[in-house]
C-alpha cells in the first residue's frame, strides 16, 4: 500500500501526515447540516478555530457555503464577507487555513489573506478558473468527488427518479473520476504533491456506497495522493445507528475514521478534534501491533488490500 507521508501546501510549507493529520471544520454559515449558525459570528468562528488547533487540528477548513443536500448556493461576495475576516485573523496567528469553496475568486482572495489550500468539493469542475488559480498561486487543492451540486442533491431514497446514484462499482467510479481530475490539475500546472483527493462520502452516494468506499479506501490510497476522509457526523453514519441526528453521531464518526485509518488514510476532516485524536491513537496502536506481529512470523496480513 502506497500512501503519501506529507502534503505540500502553498509555498514551501508541508503538512505531515504521519501518524495522521486532522483538518478542523469551521463553518461560517447559517445552514450547515451539523453546526449551521453556531459560528456565523466572526469572533465565535475564530475562537472555535483556535480551540480546534489547541485540541490538535493541523489545519483549519473555513467554509462560507453549506454543501448539505438541498442547500441554496451562496454568491462569491457573500462567501467573502463571511470567510475572509476569519481566514485573515487565523493566518495572522500562524494557523494553516484551507478555504472550502468551489469558486476561484473566493479561493484567490483567501490565498491573498494567507490560506494555503482550497478544499473544492467540485474538483475544479464548477469554476473553470479554479485549477489555474491554484497553479498560479502555488497553492494546494483537495479534489472531491460528488454526483451533483447541492441544489440537485438529495440523500439516499429521496433521490428524484432517474437521479439515484448508480455507479456500478462505486469505488472504481470514484477512483476514475479523481484520477481524471488529478490529471487535469497537473496539466494546468498544479504540482502533483500539492493535490489531495477526497471520495466525497455523503455526496451522491447511498448508505451502502458510502460504506463500500470506507471499506476499500486503500484502493484510493494506493494512488499516492493524500486521501482526505470527511465522514464527520454525516447521515450515512446516523443510518447505521437507527437514524440518530447529527449531534449524536460522534461514535459513528470515530468508528468511520478509525476504519479508514486501518485502510491507510491519514488525513481527516472532522468537527470533533480531541475525540478524533483519541480514536486515531488507538487505531495507530492496532496498526503497529499488527505490523510487529507480522514481522515476528505470525500469520497476520494487515492491512488487507
Image (cartoon, helix red, strand yellow):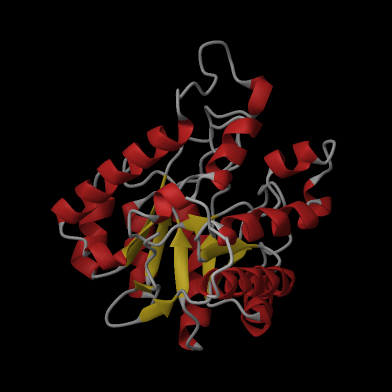
Q: Residue furthest front?
A: 297
Please indicate whether residue 281 sits to the left or right of residue 222 in the image. Answer: right
Q: Please name the residue shown 54% across and 50% down the image.
A: 65
Q: Position of residue 222 (x, y in %)?
A: 37, 55
Quadrant of the snapshot with the N terminus? bottom left
Q: Position of residue 83 (x, y in %)?
A: 51, 64
Q: Position of residue 38 (x, y in %)?
A: 74, 61
Query: Is residue 126 in view from this perspective?
Result: no
Query: Is residue 93 in view from this perspective?
Result: yes
Q: Nearer the viewer, residue 11 or 217?
A: 217
Name above or below for residue 42 compared with residue 271: below
The number of callouts visible is: 0
Q: Nearer the viewer, residue 238 or 51?
A: 238
Q: Quadrant of residue 210?
A: top right
Q: Residue furthest top?
A: 161
Name above or below for residue 76 compared with residue 15: above
Name above or below for residue 5 compared with residue 131: below
Q: Position of residue 165 (x, y in %)?
A: 52, 24
Q: Nearer the viewer, residue 253 or 18?
A: 18
Q: Please name the residue shown 64% across and 30% down the image.
A: 155
Name above or below for residue 275 compared with residue 47: above
Amino acid at each position: 500500500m502506497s500512501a503519501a507521508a506529507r502534503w505540500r501546501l502553498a509555498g514551501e510549507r508541508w503538512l505531515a501526515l504521519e501518524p495522521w493529520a486532522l483538518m478542523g471544520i469551521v463553518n461560517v454559515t447559517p445552514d450547515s447540516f451539523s453546526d449551521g449558525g453556531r459560528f456565523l459570528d466572526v469572533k465565535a468562528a475564530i475562537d472555535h478555530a483556535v480551540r480546534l488547533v489547541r485540541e490538535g487540528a493541523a489545519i483549519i477548513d473555513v467554509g462560507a457555503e453549506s454543501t448539505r443536500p438541498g442547500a441554496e448556493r451562496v454568491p462569491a461576495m457573500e462567501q467573502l464577507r463571511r470567510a475572509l475576516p476569519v481566514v485573515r485573523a487565523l493566518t495572522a496567528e500562524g494557523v494553516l487555513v484551507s478555504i472550502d469553496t468551489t469558486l476561484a475568486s473566493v479561493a484567490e482572495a483567501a490565498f491573498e489573506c494567507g490560506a494555503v489550500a482550497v478544499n473544492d468539493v467540485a474538483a475544479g469542475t464548477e469554476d473553470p478558473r479554479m485549477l489555474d488559480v491554484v497553479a498560479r498561486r502555488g497553492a494546494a487543492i483537495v479534489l472531491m468527488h460528488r454526483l451533483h451540486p447541492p441544489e440537485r442533491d438529495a440523500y439516499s431514497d429521496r433521490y428524484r427518479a432517474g437521479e439515484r446514484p448508480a455507479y456500478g462499482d462505486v469505488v472504481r467510479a470514484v477512483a476514475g473520476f479523481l484520477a481524471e481530475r488529478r490529471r487535469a490539475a497537473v496539466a494546468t500546472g498544479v504540482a502533483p504533491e500539492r493535490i489531495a483527493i477526497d471520495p466525497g462520502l455523503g455526496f451522491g452516494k447511498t448508505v451502502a456506497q458510502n460504506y463500500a468506499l470506507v471499506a476499500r479506501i486503500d484502493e484510493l490510497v494506493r494512488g499516492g495522493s493524500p486521501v482526505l476522509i470527511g465522514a464527520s457526523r454525516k447521515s450515512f453514519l446516523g443510518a447505521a445507528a437507527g437514524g440518530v441526528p447529527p449531534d449524536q453521531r460522534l461514535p459513528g464518526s470515530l468508528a468511520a475514521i478509525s476504519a479508514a485509518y486501518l485502510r491507510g488514510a491519514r488525513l481527516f476532516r472532522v468537527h470533533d478534534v480531541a475525540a478524533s485524536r483519541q480514536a486515531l491513537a488507538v487505531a495507530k496502536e492496532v496498526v503497529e501491533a499488527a505490523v510487529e506481529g507480522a514481522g515476528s512470523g505470525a500469520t497476520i496480513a494487515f492491512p488487507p488490500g
